[in-house]
Amino acid sequence: MATIRLQREDFDIGAETAALANGRTDIGAVVAFTGICRGGDGGQPITAMTLEHYPGMAETEIARHVAEAESRWPLIGVTVIHRYGRVVPGENIVLVLTAAAHRADAFTAAEFLMDYLKTRAPFWKEEERAGASAWVGASETDNAAAQRWATPSTCSDAAE
């Protein structure tokens, strides 16, 4: 079961986690990753970020990568929520929840999905800094992290 939403408004991490696990007794782990707009990395502070996407296409591409994660790891549920529009430092941008019987599968699948969202998802990010703005792409570090998923890894069979 997968939930994928793109939305302007913020999300409630606790409510989304509860909805994913509601009534399930086969879930042994839920991993949550929340991406938050930061104010910068030492240089001139970021005052806001605007995220744009192609409606329809973005959801389809995210669903395709969720399906890939589900084929690589025995997931019980996945939630991906990505905001668009203008966000300011301290606000949530993205939530990835992965549920599995075992923590290793949930952790690895969440990392796989975030590496995809950070580098290949059809979003465009414009950072605002003190009177100037610039479109930004994935960093070399982000691209290297995503590259490791190019060949399918084996699923974890480790017990808790």
Image (cartoon, helix red, strand yellow):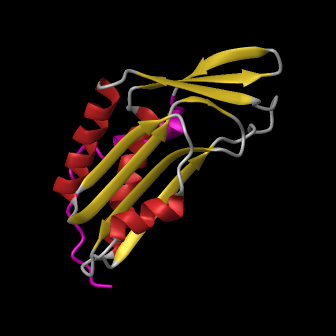
In the image, residue 68 lies at what x, y percent? 21, 47
Q: Nearer the viewer, residue 98 or 142?
A: 98
Most distant residue in the left direction: 71
Q: Nearer the viewer, residue 76 or 152?
A: 76
Q: Quadrant of residue 145?
A: top left
- Left or right: where does residue 159 sit relative to residue 16? left
Magenta range: 138-160
- Left or right: where does residue 22 sit relative to residue 36? left
Residue 23 in the magenta stretch? The answer is no
Q: Residue at x 35, y 61 (%)?
A: 98
Q: Residue at x 39, y 69 (%)?
A: 30
Most distant residue in the bottom direction: 160
Is residue 60 something that shows in the picture?
A: yes
Q: Residue at x 54, y 56 (%)?
A: 12
The answer to whether 11 is drawn above or below residue 141 in the figure is below
- Left or right: where does residue 140 sit relative to residue 145? right
Is residue 145 something that shows in the picture?
A: no
The answer to whether 94 is drawn above or below residue 44 in the figure is below
In the image, residue 43 lies at what x, y percent? 80, 31
